[in-house]
Image (tube, rainbow, N blue to C red):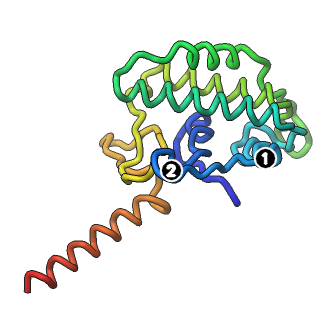
């Protein structure tokens, strides 16, 4: 399994690792190894860290806090205090260590570094002007949230590959079916 990074923000990409929240939730971070792989694929770290089940629980808790803060913000609701505290606490942690190597930049760290980088991303997003651009995917079953940075501000789907094309294809089939019934 590989991860999808279509949300336009590190924290929202982590939130997207639990898919289909309202219908049949699909957990993409099932093991500590999944989380370690996500950290590298997301660009937080350049080497997979050694993680355990407690680290997995920690990052899943942060993921859910970010998701609730983002969705509450979209709806104009107050942020849940426990989620706000968790994100702020994690944002105060030590981020990934960066170093220059002959092959480029190395980013190393542990679960705390991943949590700090994700939480800082959430703070920057939800506390900044782009908070007004956070949207939920327009595909009914999809619960992924993303930052709409389109020029017109009218992005509807988290990504074309998984949701946009499917919605468009379903609409096309529906129009074709109606047209053939009308004849």
Q: Quadrant of residue 98?
A: top right
* Relative height, residue 52 to residue 82 (above, below): below
Q: Within 10 Å of the Cα at label 1, are there few (<14), some (14-19), or many (20+) other Cα atoms?
A: some
Which residue is the site of mark 1?
A: 31
* Relative height, residue 142 to residue 100 (above, below): below
x, y (%) of residue 153? 32, 40
What is the C-alpha distance between the residues marked 1 and 2? 19 Å
The disc, 1 or 2, on the residue closer to the chain's N-terminal end is 2
Tell me the quadrant of the picture where the N terminus can be found: bottom right
Labelled pair 1, 2 in contact (Cβ < 8 Å): no
- For the residue pair 162 and 181, the one nearer the viewer reads as 181
| Residue drawn 41% across the image and 16% down it | 78
* Relative height, residue 13 to residue 157 (above, below): above
- For the residue pair 101 and 147, the one nearer the viewer reads as 147
Q: Is residue 17 left or right of residue 140?
A: right
Which residue is the site of mark 2?
A: 20
Q: Is residue 54 left or right of residue 169?
A: right
What secondary structure is marked by label 1? loop
x, y (%) of residue 135? 40, 38
| Residue drawn 40% across the image and 59% down it | 164
* Relative height, residue 26 to residue 60 (above, below): below
Taking the view exactly as shown, the residue that stands out farthest to the left is: 183
Q: Quadrant of residue 17?
A: top right
- For the residue pair 106 and 117, the one nearer the viewer reads as 117
| Residue drawn 50% across the image and 17% down it | 80
x, y (%) of residue 86? 64, 18
Tell me the quadrant of the picture where the C terminus can be found: bottom left
């Amino acid at each position: 399994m590989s991860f999808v990074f279509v949300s336009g923000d590190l924290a929202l990409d982590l939130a997207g690792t639990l898919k289909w929240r309202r219908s049949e939730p699909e957990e993409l971070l099932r093991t500590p190894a999944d989380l370690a792989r996500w950290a590298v694929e997301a660009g937080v770290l350049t080497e997979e860290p050694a993680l355990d089940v407690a680290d997995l629980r920690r990052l899943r808790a942060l993921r859910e806090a970010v998701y609730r803060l983002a969705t509450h913000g979209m709806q104009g609701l107050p942020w849940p205090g426990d989620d706000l505290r968790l994100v702020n606490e994690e944002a105060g942690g030590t981020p990934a260590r960066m170093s220059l190597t002959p092959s480029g930049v190395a980013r190393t760290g542990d679960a705390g570094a991943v949590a700090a980088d994700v939480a800082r991303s959430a703070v920057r997003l939800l506390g900044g002007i782009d908070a007004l651009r956070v949207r939920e995917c327009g595909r009914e079953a999809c619960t992924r949230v993303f930052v709409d940075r389109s020029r017109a501000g009218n992005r509807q789907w988290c990504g074309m590959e998984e949701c946009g094309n499917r919605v468009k294809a379903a609409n096309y089939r529906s129009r074709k079916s109606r047209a053939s019934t009308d004849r």
